[in-house]
Amino acid sequence: MFNKSSTSPAQSDSPVIEKSYERDLENGCKANVCAHELPDGDIELVVSVCDKEGRSVAKRTTRLPGAEWTVPDAMKRGRDQAERIAGGESGRLPCADRADREEDDDDD
């Protein structure tokens, strides 16, 4: 994870606050989360999960009210969502199914 502060040429007096996170999960999925502050102060959160081959299996973009959310808090929410999606909470993903099969094999 890294912090990135930049200044938009159109709004040189308002710095843009952005954070991103990318992680390879144990079950083979890849989580990618990005949050940044919009010019009006709201936070845009993008949560993406890809399978082992890099194909996108889920992508969510959410606008959070800036009066209630900070970029770091949005990142925590996004990481949690990505891990839940990869784990199969929002539907069965091939990478989640593979992890379940491996666990089932241990029961024999």
Image (spheres, rainbow, N blue to C red):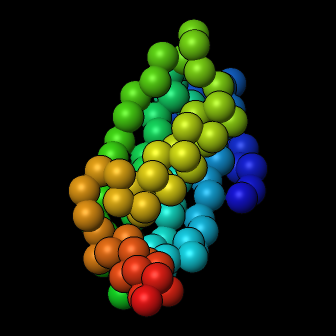
Q: Residue furthest left?
A: 91
Residue 101 percent location from the top left of the image: 37, 82
The N terminus: image quadrant: bottom right
Query: The C terminus appears in which quarter of the rendering?
Result: bottom left
Q: Position of residue 75 (x, y in %)?
A: 61, 42
Coordinates of residue 67 in the picture (x, y in percent): 57, 10
Residue 26, position as x, y percentages in the image: 57, 76
**Which is more toward the observer, 70 or 18?**
70
At 60% from the left and 68% from the top, the residue drawn is 23
Can you see residue 2?
yes
The residue shown at (51%, 28%) is 43
Closer to the camera in the image, 68 or 10 = 68
Q: Quadrant of residue 98?
A: bottom left
**Left or right: residue 40 compared with residue 70:** left
* Apparent side of residue 82 relative to residue 1 in the rendered image (left or right): left
Q: Residue at x 39, y 75 (%)?
A: 100
Q: Is residue 54 visible?
A: no
List the single residue furthest toward the front: 108
